[in-house]
Image (spheres, helix red, strand yellow):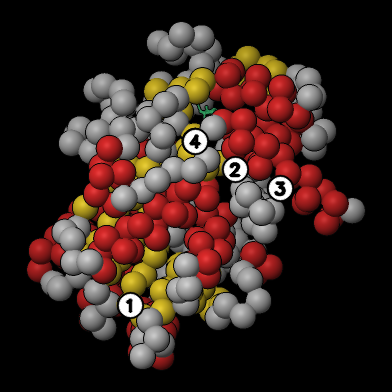
Amino acid sequence: EPRHILVSGGAGYIGSHMVLALLGAGERPIVLDDLSTGFRAAVPAGVPFVEGSSGDAALIGELIERYPIEAIIHFAASIVVPESVAHPLDYYANNTVNARAMLACAVAHGVPHIVFSSTAAVYGEPERVPIDEEQPTAPINPYGRSKLMVEWMLEDAAKAHPISYAALRYFNVAGADPQGRAGQSSRDATHLIKIAVQAALGKRPGIDVFGTDYPTPDGSCIRDYVHVADLAQAHLDALRYLRGGAPSLACNIGYQRGFSVLEVIDTVKRVSGVDFEVRLRERRPGDPASLVATNERAISRLGWTPRYDDLDTIVRHALDWERSLSSRAA
Ligand code: UFG
C-alpha cells in the first residue's frame, strides 16, 4: 500500500514548502490545515486537502484509517512570541493541547513516526552561543513553553509506545522557494526579514528596530536565519532517519552563524537597492539577546546538507516572493 505523509499546517509558510519538498522526493503528502493563518491556494493542485483542526481527534483518526498514514509532520501552531506573551492560554490550546490530541491519535492508530516543529525558543536565554542540544531548556516566553511541553510528551510517549520522533528546533526561518512556487504570505507579518522586504518594496513606511542596548556588538539582537528550503529538506532527512529505525531525537536546525537586526536591515537595503526608514525603538518583550545554533547533530545524524546558507540568497528569495505577491494583488 502506498505510504502517505500527513502534513498538519501544510497550507502555512513552512508547511507549504514541505509539501513541495515531499512531492519532489516522490512522497504522498496529505494537508490538514484550519486556514487560520494558512491559505488554501498554497496547497498545490492534486494534493489532498482537509480543512480542520489538528486537535480534532475524530477527523485525524479517520484520515489515518482512510489513507494509510506512515508519518505525521506537525507544523500547525501559533508562532509569534509577543502574541504568546499577550495571549498565553491561546498558545497552550493551539500548540500544546492540539499536539497532544494529534499524538494520541498517532499512538492509537499505530502511526510509527512524527516530525515535530519545535523551536530555538525552548532554550530561552541560552548559557552560551552557539547553542547545542545538550544545553538546558528554559524557555522565557509562553510560545517556547507551549512547544517544550510537546517535546516532553513526545519523549514520554516514545518510551511507552512504538513510535519514534524528531523534534526539530528551528532557528529563524526566512526566505522563499528558490523556484518562486511558495513563500511567506502572512496576513499580519511580524518576522524581521518579511517586514524589511516589505519596507524595501514600499509596502510599509520603514521598520522599527526593537532594542539597541543588548549585549551584542551593535546592540541589536542576533539570530541564526535559516532558509525555508533547507529547513524543509531537514524534515525529509529526519523522515529517512526515522524510517531507518534510528532513535528519537531533538535536533537544532540552523547555520551556526548569527546576524544582528541591523545587519539584516543593511543586507535588505543592499540586495534590494532601496533605502528605507529605520527607527530605533525600545526592546520588545520576550526577546533573548542572541540565538545561534550548533548544527553538528543535524549534519551527522540526519545527514542534513544545507544549500542556501547565505543571507543575501535568503533575502533575494524573500524579495522575489514579496514582489510576486504585489503583482498577483495588482
Ligand atoms: N525585530 C525588529 N523589528 C521588527 C521585527 C523584528 O527589530 O519589525 C527583531 C526582533 O525584536 C528580534 C529579531 O528581529 O530581535 C527577530 O525577530 P522575529 O520576530 O523575526 O523572530 P523571533 O526571533 O522573535 O522568533 C522567531 C520565530 C519563533 C522562533 C524563533 C527562534 O517567530 O517562532 O524565531 O529563534 F521560535
Q: How far apart are marks 1 and 2 (CA)?
A: 29 Å
- Which residue is the site of mark 1? 70
- Which residue is the site of mark 3? 321
Q: Is mark 4 within 8 Å of ligand 1?
A: no
Q: Residue at x 41, y 79 (%)?
A: 4
Q: What residue type is labelled 3?
A: Trp
Question: Label for residue 175?
Answer: 2
In the rendered image, the quadrant that contains the N terminus is bottom left
Q: Distance between the residues labelled 3 and 2?
A: 8 Å
**Residue that sits furthest to the left in the current view:** 160
Left or right of 220 in this view: 208: right
- Which residue is the site of mark 4? 309
Contact between labelled residues 4 and 2, with CB atoms less than 8 Å apart: no
Q: Quadrant of residue 109?
A: bottom left
Q: Earlier in the sequence, mark 1 or mark 4?
A: 1
Q: Which of marks 3 and 2 is nearer the N terminus?
A: 2
Q: Distance between the residues labelled 1 and 4?
A: 31 Å
